[in-house]
Image: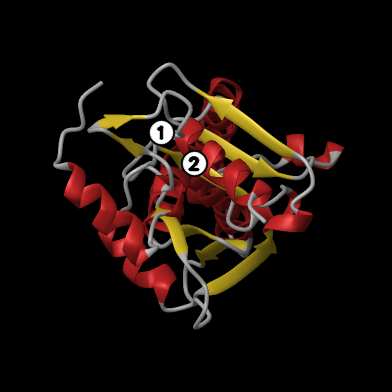
Amino acid sequence: MPLPYPEAFCRKEHARGTANLRVNVCRHGRLSDHAPKAASMNPSAETVVAASLDADERLLWAGQPRQGVRLRAQDALQIPFSLLWGGFALFWEYQALTIAAKAPGPTAVVFPLFGLPFVLIGLYLIFGRFFVDARSRARTFYGVTNERVLIISGLFAAQTKSLPLRSLGELTLTQHADGSGTLSFGSAPLRAFAHPAGSWPGADRSLPPSFDMIARVKDVYDIIRTAQKAP
């Protein structure tokens, strides 16, 4: 397969060391059949992740989760549950307001206030969690270097999680038909099924670290595996 850019550019890419997967890739203007395809870097993610690197560390890949409001597999169960919860909470609140309008004394205040938290939880489950999840993903950045995996995230304050390549342990690849997917570093505990990612702020604390909802997930998986095997 011919290269979409001159062979000289390939030598420059290798020389500056920002993508060590280009080693032995350029051969007479063609890509080696056995060379891994390098996933493209997200420029803004590259800038954020590069600020956390050591002086002798090389950035191999940087990216972000897919942006905007997204549905997840668990929404097949969470959406019906949220509608049932929210519908019951709204019905209860309506009944409480109806009774309160006719009841004297503190009952007129206590009944509606008692149901208000359940209404707010229901509205969050139906609508709010999608926007919180989107905001969280907008502030999440991933990086792979020749030494470690980096996850920079946080709704209000940035937190950096660093995982050495040599001790990543179990690496789980989940890929969808469009090539996007998730890379998980470690196995999930049983309680993680009750609190999947995106269901509630902080729910991902019970999950193993991951590159969530990234494009070309198999390419990133290959980058990590190749970096792990490097001497």
The residue singled out by tag 1 in the image is 216
Outermost residue toward the front in this view: 28
Tag count: 2
In the image, is residue 193 above or below residue 54? above
* Horizontal side, residue 66 vs residue 7: left or right: right
Q: Residue 90 in the image: x percent, y percent? A: 50, 37
Does residue 82 appear anywhere in the picture? yes
What crowding class fits label 1: few (fewer than 14 Cα within 10 Å), some (14-19), or many (20 or more)?
some
> Mark 2: which amino acid?
Val
Left or right: residue 14 versus residue 5 is: right
Contact flag, marks 2 and 1 (Cβ < 8 Å): yes
Q: Residue at x 76, y 41 (%)?
A: 192
Residue topped by disc 2:
220
Q: Would residue 49 appear left or right of 46 to someone viewing this image?
A: right
Q: Quadrant of the C terminus?
A: bottom right
Question: Looking at the image, which residue is at 68% across and 62% down?
Answer: 163
CA–CA distance in space, label 2 to label 1 = 7 Å
* Residue plotted at (62% across, 62% down): 148
| Mark 1 element type | loop
Given residues 192 and 114, the one toward you in this image is: 192
Query: What kind of residue is marked 1?
Result: Arg
Vertical comparison of 167 with 80: above or below: below
Residue 21 point in image, percent of width and height: 45, 47
Depth check: 31 or 140 in front?
31
- How far from the left and from the top, in percent, is residue 154? 51, 67
Identify the residue at image location x=35%, y=40%. Answer: 69
